[in-house]
């Protein structure tokens, strides 16, 4: 849909130039509302650092209102500065120097990089091999070489398991070690991003959860990390990939009511 929209905008701009303001209406389907490739998404964030980069872009702090919280302290180097960008991953020189705010200096160095740790015997469990474990073994077979690695990666896991079994490959494994992911270069997570924006009382940081509820099941918003971040202006106003494409090409996208494509009028898709 994004490519089709780009083509349509190109056509109307060539035929009509800048005579009109171009507005495209789309129904609210999952495809039309899909987030940007580097879009901000609080729901996809874990409490602490991720096992890989977040995929989210850096964000400029436009102003205090709507972005920054009551615990912002300009004298703290880890905290954001209005007019500058906040990184969503531990990638900048300052990020790599300071690391997660709750770690001691020793912990910061010990947990900086990925590491393999031994699993205690009593905790080892037999499991089905993952795609990353099956594919190298399949590529050693004649069938795997014929199919090619790219095609194997596109296969769903259950299909790969069946193919491996057909090639007499052991599909189960009992791992003796596991990977513990370090923080450097990885997505910061909700706790760190909220702290840098001044939403975290550092003395009581352990009180914060992804979503925290009282004994009656009511949300405690000031201690719920996902709520705090999702309520920030930049996360609230995040555009879909379709809206972003339209705006970048000088047009506008309006998402109509879900399941009512007919609201878009002439030229709407009919399925």
Image (cartoon, rainbow, N blue to C red):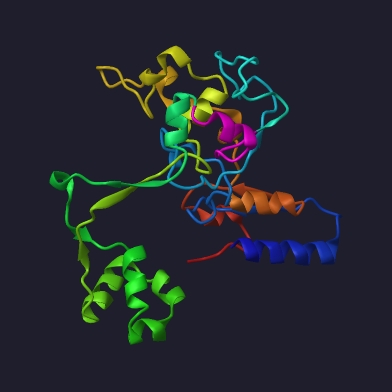
Residue 92: percent from left, percent from top: 63, 38
Q: Is residue 155 above or below residue 253?
A: below
Please tell me which residue is depicted at 64% across the width and 20% down the height of the picture. 65
Question: Does residue 226 show up?
Answer: no
Q: Nearer the viewer, residue 115 or 266?
A: 115
Q: Is residue 13 above or below residue 263?
A: below
Question: Does residue 182 show up?
Answer: yes
Residue 207: percent from left, percent from top: 36, 18
Q: Is residue 269 above or below residue 251?
A: below
Q: Is residue 234 above or below residue 37?
A: above
Residue 141: percent from left, percent from top: 33, 83
Q: Nearer the viewer, residue 202 or 212?
A: 202
Quadrant of the rendered image containing residue 4? bottom right
The mark total stands at 0
Quadrant of the rendered image containing residue 268? bottom right
Q: Nearer the viewer, residue 138 or 115?
A: 115
Say whether residue 253 is left or right of residue 187.
right
- Name the quadrant of the N terminus: bottom right
Please tell me which residue is depicted at 40% across the width and 83% down the height of the picture. 145
Please tell me which residue is depicted at 32% across the width and 74% down the height of the picture. 137
Residue 106: percent from left, percent from top: 44, 28
Chain part drawn in magenta:
86-100
């Amino acid at each position: 849909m994004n490519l089709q929209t780009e083509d349509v905008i190109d056509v109307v701009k060539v035929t009509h130039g800048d005579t009109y303001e171009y507005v495209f209406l789309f129904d609210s389907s999952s495809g039309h509302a899909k987030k940007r490739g580097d879009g901000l998404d609080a729901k996809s964030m874990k409490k602490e650092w991720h096992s890989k980069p977040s995929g989210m872009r850096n964000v400029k702090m436009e102003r205090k209102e709507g972005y920054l919280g009551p615990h912002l302290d300009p004298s703290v180097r880890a905290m954001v500065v209005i007019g500058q960008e906040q990184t969503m991953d531990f990638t900048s020189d300052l990020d790599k120097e300071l690391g997660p705010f709750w770690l001691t200096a020793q912990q910061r160095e010990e947990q900086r990089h990925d590491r393999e740790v031994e699993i205690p015997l009593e905790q080892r469990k037999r499991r089905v091999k993952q795609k990353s474990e099956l594919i190298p073994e399949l590529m050693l077979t004649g069938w795997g070489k014929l199919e090619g690695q790219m095609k194997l990666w596109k296969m769903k896991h259950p299909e790969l398991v069946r193919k491996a079994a057909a090639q007499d490959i052991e599909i189960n494994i009992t791992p003796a070690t596991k990977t513990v992911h370090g923080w450097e270069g990885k997505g910061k997570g909700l706790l760190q991003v909220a702290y840098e924006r001044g939403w975290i009382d550092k003395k009581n940081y352990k009180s914060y959860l992804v979503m925290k509820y009282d004994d009656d099941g009511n949300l405690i918003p000031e201690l719920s990390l996902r709520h705090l971040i999702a309520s920030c202006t930049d996360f609230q106003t995040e555009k879909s990939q379709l809206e972003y494409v339209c705006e970048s090409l000088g047009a506008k996208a309006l998402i109509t009511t879900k399941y009512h494509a007919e609201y878009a009028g002439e030229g709407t898709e009919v399925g």
